[in-house]
Each structure stands twice: as structure tokens, then as C-alpha cells.
């Protein structure tokens, strides 16, 4: 009887080793998917918020510098939830170049002091979501388009 039970004592350790080789990759994969989904969802929320802000902000477009300042304020809203860019980044690694802001008229021409804006599109471009073992690259996704509902001020310049 004692000989038989001593042979079985190692079985639990072997079963644990076999189960661990299967369970650890599943656990790591679940973590990777969850973290990537979390960051993408956060990015979607920020892009949507930036688009909504852009659709109501006064579009002062007396010169190209004013249009650039308008777009910079929108990019800052996406990155830091503040038009002046103060505060910490909401999404780690999201650079100014990763946020594309397009404001166009009804014919698809870039809005300026001669073209009245009709829609605003904000999207994330060339952004890498780094998790522990893998990298996911997003390009022009998420992308949100809103109709422009703000005040059009072609004779004013951005402060």
C-alpha cells in the first residue's frame, strides 16, 4: 500500500506542470487582448470627444496660422482633454502627429476664409498600441465625423 501511494505523489506535480503550460499562454493572451481593447476604447472616446469639441468651436480662419491653431487645439483635446494642451496625456504614447484633423466644406475642399466648413473629421493615424508581447497599429481608426455647427468667423484670427 505504501509503495503505491508514493508513486502517486509525483502525479500532481506533473499534472500542474502540464496544466500550467496550457493556462499561462491563455492568461497572457487574455491580458493582451484586454489591454489592447482598453487602449483602443480610450482612443475612440478621446477621438469622439475631440470631434464633438471641434464641431462646436468657433472657426476663426482669417489666415493659415489661425486654421493651424484651431487644428492644434483639437489635437490637444484628443491628447490631453484640454485645448491648450496642459495636463497629462490621456493615452500613453499618443503624439501630436498621431491625430489628424480635417475640416472641409460641402464639396470636400479644406475650409478656410473662402470655404464655409460643413464637416469636421478627427482620426488617429499611425498609432501603435504597445502591450507586453505584441503591438497593434491603428491607421485612420477610430475616425469620427461630425457636421460643423459652430460659428464661422472668416474675418477673425485665433488668439
Image (spheres, grey):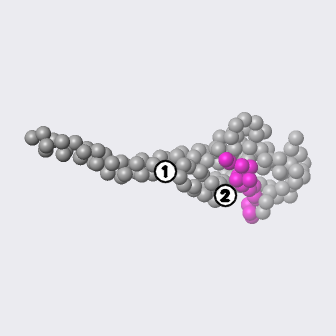
Circle 2 SS class: loop
| Residue 109 higher or lower than 7, as above or below | below
Q: Provide residue 72's location: percent of width, then percent of height.
A: 78, 47
Q: Provide residue 41's location: percent of width, then percent of height.
A: 56, 47
**Which comes sooner in the sequence, label 2 or label 1?**
1
- Tell me what residue is drawn at x 53 percent, y 52 percent: 133
Q: Farthest residue to the top: give it.
A: 87
Q: Is 55 situated left or right of 3 in this image?
A: right
Q: Provide residue 116's location: percent of width, then percent of height.
A: 80, 55
- Tell me what residue is drawn at x 78 percent, y 49 percent: 71
Q: Which residue is mark 2?
A: 126
Q: Is residue 103 magenta?
A: yes
- The answer to whether any part of residue 41 appears in the image is no
Q: Is 153 situated left or right of 44 in this image?
A: right
Q: Provide residue 94's location: percent of width, then percent of height.
A: 68, 48
- Tell me what residue is drawn at x 22 percent, y 42 percent: 9
From the viewer's side, name the closer residue of 75 and 118.
75
| Residue 45 higher or lower than 109, as above or below | above
Q: Which residue is mark 1?
A: 33
Number of callouts: 2
Q: Which quadrant would residue 108 be assigned to in this image?
A: bottom right
User: What range is drawn magenta here?
Assistant: 93-108
Amino acid at each position: 500500500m505504501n509503495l503505491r501511494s508514493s508513486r502517486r505523489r509525483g502525479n500532481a506535480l506533473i499534472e500542474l506542470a502540464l496544466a500550467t503550460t496550457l493556462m499561462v499562454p491563455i492568461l497572457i493572451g487574455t491580458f493582451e487582448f484586454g489591454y489592447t481593447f482598453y487602449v483602443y476604447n480610450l482612443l475612440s472616446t478621446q477621438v469622439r470627444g475631440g470631434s464633438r469639441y471641434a464641431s462646436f468651436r468657433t472657426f476663426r480662419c482669417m489666415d493659415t496660422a489661425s486654421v493651424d491653431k484651431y487644428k492644434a487645439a483639437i489635437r490637444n483635446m484628443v491628447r490631453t482633454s484640454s485645448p491648450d494642451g496642459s495636463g497629462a496625456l490621456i493615452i500613453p504614447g499618443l503624439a501630436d502627429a498621431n491625430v489628424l484633423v480635417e475640416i472641409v466644406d460641402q464639396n470636400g475642399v479644406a475650409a478656410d476664409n473662402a470655404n464655409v466648413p460643413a464637416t469636421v473629421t478627427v482620426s488617429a493615424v499611425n498609432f501603435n498600441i504597445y502591450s507586453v508581447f505584441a503591438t497593434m497599429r491603428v491607421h485612420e481608426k477610430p475616425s469620427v465625423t461630425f457636421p460643423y455647427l459652430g460659428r464661422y468667423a472668416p474675418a477673425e484670427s485665433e488668439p
